Amino acid sequence: QGPSAARRARTMLLLVWTLLNAVSGLKADDGGMVEELVTEKEAEESHRQDSVNLLTFISLLTLTILTIWLFKHRRVRFLHETGLAMIYGLLVGVILRYGIPATSYHNKTPPSCSLKEGPSSTLLLNISGKFFEYTLKGEINFREIHNVEQNDMLRKVTFDPEVFFNILLPPIIFHAGYSLKKRHFFRNLGSIITYAFLGTAISCFVIGNLMYGVVKLMRAVGQLTEKFYYTDCLFFGAIISATDPVTVLAIFNELHADGDLYALLFGESVMNDAVAIVLSSSIVAYQPAGANTHMFDASAFFKSVGIFLGIFSGSFVMGAATGVVTALISCSFTKLHCFPLLETALFFLMSWSTFLLAEACGFTGVVAVLFCGITQAHYTSNNLSEESTKRTKQLFEVLHFLAENFIFSYMGLALFTFQKHIFSPIFIIGAFVAIFIGRALNIYPLSFLLNLGRRDKIRGNFQHMMMFAGLRGAMAFALAIRDTATSARQMMFTTTLLIVFFTVWVFGGGTTPMLSWLHIRVGVDPDQDLQPSGDSFQVLQGDEGQSKTKQESAWLFRLWYTFDHNYLKPILTHSGPPLTSTLPSYCGPLASCLTSPRAYENHEQLRDPDTDLIHNDADLTFTFGDTAITTNGASASRADATGGLGWSTNGKRSGSTSEEALERELDSREQELLSRGTRLVFPMEDHI
Amino acid sequence: QGPSAARRARTMLLLVWTLLNAVSGLKADDGGMVEELVTEKEAEESHRQDSVNLLTFISLLTLTILTIWLFKHRRVRFLHETGLAMIYGLLVGVILRYGIPATSYHNKTPPSCSLKEGPSSTLLLNISGKFFEYTLKGEINFREIHNVEQNDMLRKVTFDPEVFFNILLPPIIFHAGYSLKKRHFFRNLGSIITYAFLGTAISCFVIGNLMYGVVKLMRAVGQLTEKFYYTDCLFFGAIISATDPVTVLAIFNELHADGDLYALLFGESVMNDAVAIVLSSSIVAYQPAGANTHMFDASAFFKSVGIFLGIFSGSFVMGAATGVVTALISCSFTKLHCFPLLETALFFLMSWSTFLLAEACGFTGVVAVLFCGITQAHYTSNNLSEESTKRTKQLFEVLHFLAENFIFSYMGLALFTFQKHIFSPIFIIGAFVAIFIGRALNIYPLSFLLNLGRRDKIRGNFQHMMMFAGLRGAMAFALAIRDTATSARQMMFTTTLLIVFFTVWVFGGGTTPMLSWLHIRVGVDPDQDLQPSGDSFQVLQGDEGQSKTKQESAWLFRLWYTFDHNYLKPILTHSGPPLTSTLPSYCGPLASCLTSPRAYENHEQLRDPDTDLIHNDADLTFTFGDTAITTNGASASRADATGGLGWSTNGKRSGSTSEEALERELDSREQELLSRGTRLVFPMEDHI
């Protein structure tokens, strides 16, 4: 049965391939319709061409899917779907570039006219009394004027770079935010934030400075004559610092590798995408006043830092706010459950509007979408019906899958069809060395610092794995292709493309051997792994004194937890205690207005061993217990006294209700542990 | 609990509305960033503007969803979601038109330059040595030159009409094809095709000729000075003949109205969309040779008919072919079941590629997508795993829902923001009268003819309901907005918009009263309705002689059924008998190569009362039994002798295997009927 299926599969592949070629062949064909107007004919031709281009990509995706299936079926792990998509893209790129003769009927320079004024977005063309409207496409190089129409076909297959930012990246990033495994993510939140912010900044500056050296070297040996500023190097450092270990994570998922390592890698890659995108736009905004030196300027630097903080926090607030609004809506319209279609559509629309809202306000849509995803997962998904939760998850899964594979196959295609590649061997080699050094100076020193504070140390093999998993992917590509106007940017784009290819194929393919070489445990039982391991037990079950000690350093988190549990959760979801019991009595009317009727019902059952509720509460308890340590780790370099002070003042301030709630949860948590019969001894020893 | 939820909902609505207004207000705001290049700033501004526009629509959809929920919650049926979307669109249109002052900073005529040659798609602009590339947007009227930039904001909110055809219509039409209720649809196939082809043609010509009269009248009273040809009238007839009773069907679904009436209405509306789109493009292609009279010309007429047949059959073949290829792939990759995500993605991509393939080949993508949907439902969905079937259905459901409501809210918006409306009272009144007469001359005479042949007559109240349900919707709008260059087309667009508004609100809102007034039975138990009613019983259980008589007239269908069951189903799905038993023995190797291993397994169980299989087979039997009558009905005007001849020759030709298969099915069908305990008497009397 196996070989027969494979034979049939091969026949099918051949069939699809033939079909694809037949369709590609259609390009040369002009069709038979004769239209009066040239413009109408051209519009139709252009529409047909667009269809063929999209069809090419869709056929590529189809092929990728079929081959992935073959690979999955045979448990081939050395090549991930994204790597495969790139290979197919490369093949089609080669065919488009060399296989199809240049169309000759357009082999002429387009008409041109001269104006004195600067370019405006709209231009009117007067042809014997008839007026035609033209829109600006962009500046073109004088050299390329004669190629404008000749390379029409290759140009046609080139998408507007903004497509990546506005259509393909949002579902990928949203899905990443939405599917962060809450428990492991929050447990390692401090480390993740450290790697993402501090680590990306380190990586960016290390790579930027190294590349500046490389650029000086190139200029010295006469390999570079065009402009290449220091800010360009920093920009390259920023875009290439966005890691995307999608290949590694897929294998982790399949082999059930260690949950903490997964959370560290995934969390870092998700957050550093956001950091890299904002960092790169801040660097672009870094314009030293007046002078054209592009060297260091304190005021411009601080302006850049300000822009970074402004854009990042703005996007964060916007994403979180839309998430909260969605939660509020889904919480208010309690009966929306009966119409899963409406619920899913609402969820989809609200998530998309986050992106648009952020873009409309001048923030970064992708970052907003990321935090919207995290917020939606934390609040809104509690309000959705089971059916809708599943639907929503599947919808974003499909969108994410299609978008990701589309980007990667486009990358493959771009290597041959992109018109302005500049292959500079010294720059490329320099970049490979630089990203290696940059990654090393990110992971190892930060891990050392984090380990000073972490109880659950990031061990050596984890650090090596994180070093190894520094793949580059969709985000680096999208940032690189966004602006390819200058030769410096073109060189960066080419180099980025090669780095993505190399890392995805070589590092991605080497993940499985690397896992076993580094002795990273795989086949972790997900159920067991979902149980708290290590620290949270200690926090929960240590004697009162020790528990206090751990909690003391986490006053900020405790404050947040109290606020979230007592006020946000009751307002935004149906879980948690009713607001009437947590707000002071003079807020009574407001509280009863904001609390959903279901919260009361839920509250009644709070002591029942209701699995759903306990799951919910236990989740938070883990979060609390675990992040206590992590946050501690992150702020290890700061004075520990702050924590103590914070606790003594804030612990009182938070009132007795939150204390009760926490204790109630600890109770129910213990009950659950007993009833599940899991080991209650500290399971820490197998961690180190 | 109810009032409290409603209060909360209202608060939320207010909140969303405030947010929306705040965002709309952002438009005037210019942001703080200072860029060196004007073009770059303009590009950013344009991007921001695009975000705001999309956001407006998304907010509209969100509002629509929330209000629909309120309506559904309170069982309000007089206003459907599409009607609601239009109202919200209207409101926002009014705000955009009158509420926001015209931006003044663009209040100047764009620069223009003159050329001798005709317009080309690309234009180069030379500004002191720097070259900029411009692309053609379209011809503009001399009058409007000064308004080009002034009306920028209203223009911005206007989408490229091709968006409707390439992005919004395909999911709507595919979903319609995919969700045709097979049983009732095939039972009434003949009638549906008659209404769709003959009916739409009648409607088109009746409306076209009446409107030509109206145009002559307008010219006589001096209301019309611009050109308005006979072909324009016919074109209007074609676009306005596409019915879209989405509102009525939603109510039918909710009230479980009669299944046959539902199938007739739904089938007709789905198919006549396809007919209308091809008909309108054939009329556009109707150019009487040389002369500009636009009057009747026999050769041009036959050319048009040829184009109609060519495009329609080409699109049909292309859609069916892609459906078959998908079925083949999903059938070959038997283990694809384990990866529902891959399956769904593949299904989605193949369906989309149908559209693109058809467009690339110069056929009509929307029509291809429709037949692809029908084929997918017939073959591919049998191969999908249960999980994938559900996922795929839900995916297309969401896409369809979003696209449909988007189009309708855009319609509302367009009434105020579209720049070139021409309101002509005579034309509008004439059009309302014409569509009424056109619909009447479509439904009543054709029903009379069909009833001559149908055993299960289309009764008077059904005919009235079909007459009443002649709503116009998305397709008419999309066809009308596609070309608004001449004043004739602009007048048509305005009129179409008003007709859509009126029919959706008035007829859509009046569906429930109309149903009870016409005594159409509602609350039909879907389970009971799934049982064969009337004729199929008679065919299956009538004595051998009568059964033969009925089958005789359906030789064409029988031939198709035999072929489908013996050859197509086994190749394309896992059901049906293995090919090795249906093909002659000398085809042995080919047969065993093409038959999936699961078919053998299924074949073994063929006599078992396996519900899944029986469902499948019973389905076919119904189809066979029922359509026999319908096909008979449709071809009633032709000589009945053909049928008899066909049977006597083809019945033998189809060989013994198919006979056996059919009888086996009849057996199992009867077993099933007995086991289910449904009534076995002829249930026809309650039909008339």
Image: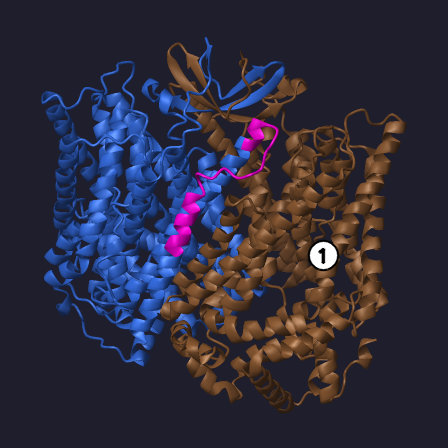
Chain colours: A blue, B brown
Query: Where does the image place residue B537, in percent across and percent down from the top left?
Result: 71, 83
Q: Which residues are magenta?
A: A16-41
Q: Using the image as rendered, state which of residue B71 and residue B433 is in the foreground.
A: B433
- Residue A4 in view here: yes
**A545 sits to left or right of B47:** left
- Location of the N terminus of chain A (image quadrant): bottom left
Asked if the stretch drawn in magenta spans residue A36, the answer is yes
- Location of the C terminus of chain A (image quadrant): bottom left
- Depicted B679 relative to depicted A564: above or below: below
Residue pushed farthest right? Answer: B221
Query: Where does the image place residue A634, in percent across and percent down from the top left?
Result: 21, 49
Query: Where does the image place residue A193, in percent across and percent down from the top left?
Result: 26, 47
**B175 sits to left or right of B553:** left
- Residue B402 in view here: no
**A420 sits to left or right of A218:** right
Q: Amino acid at mark 1?
A: Ala
Residue appearing at x 56%, y 27% in the figure: A38
Residue appearing at x 70%, y 32% in the figure: B289
Label 1: few (<14), some (14–19) or many (≥20) C-alpha neighbours in 10 Å: many
User: What residue is disc 1 on?
Assistant: B196
Q: Using the image as rendered, state which of residue A222 and residue A36 is in the foreground.
A: A36
Subunit ID for the residue under disc 1: B
Q: Using the image as rendered, state which of residue B539 and residue B656 is in the foreground.
A: B656
**A282 sits to left or right of A606:** left
Asked if the stretch drawn in magenta spans residue B52, the answer is no
Residue appearing at x 52%, y 68% in the figure: B379
